[in-house]
Image (tube, rainbow, N blue to C red):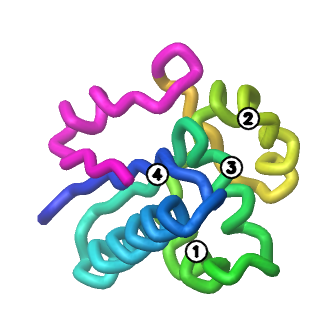
Amino acid sequence: MTKAAIVVLSNLENHNEMARVLNALETVKDFKDSGDQVELIFDGSGVVSAVNLADSDNKLNSLFQSVEDKVAGLCKFCARAFEVYDKAEKQNLPFLAEHRQHPSLRKRAADGYQVITF
């Protein structure tokens, strides 16, 4: 079985960034629909994307909802740095703080996950 950790580092500020986020969500859906083990992680400015995607008014919300069960979490440090921590908490989005308040990509690599960034 394939194991993948999809990491979103992009926000939704412009068309190029939105395309990266869309491709990340489609990639998660592809792995999920194939029965693979997949995690979706939001890090850096990607934490802003997570909060926006969870908003029902966002045009990518339905795609996000289809893979929301694969969200491992948002970087706790970055959620605070980008000032979306409170909103993410209200949306019941999980946080990751495995390595100095950040997600541990090393842990995932050691567990056999392929790490793919967008």
Residue identifier under label 1 = 64
Q: Work out whether mark 2 precedes mark 1 in sequence or the reverse, and give the earlier one.
A: 1
Q: At x 58% / y 21%, what residue is drawn?
A: 101
Q: At x 68% / y 83%, what residue is drawn?
A: 59
Instruction: Tell me: 1 left or right of 90.
Output: left
The furthest residue to the left? 1
Q: Amino acid at mark 1?
A: Phe
Range of magenta residues: 99-118
Relative to 90, say whether 86 is above or below. Answer: above
Which quadrant is the C terminus positioned in? bottom left
Residue identifier under label 2 = 82
Residue identifier under label 3 = 48
Q: Amino acid at mark 4?
A: Val
Between the residue at mark 4 and the residue at mark 2, the CA separation in whole angstroms equals 14 Å
Q: Where is residue 35 drawn, in percent x and y?
A: 25, 77
The quadrant in which residue 76 appears is top right
Instruction: Tell me: 85 left or right of 22.
Output: right
Residue 110 visible in image: yes
Q: Mark 2 touching mark 3, by CB under 8 A?
A: yes
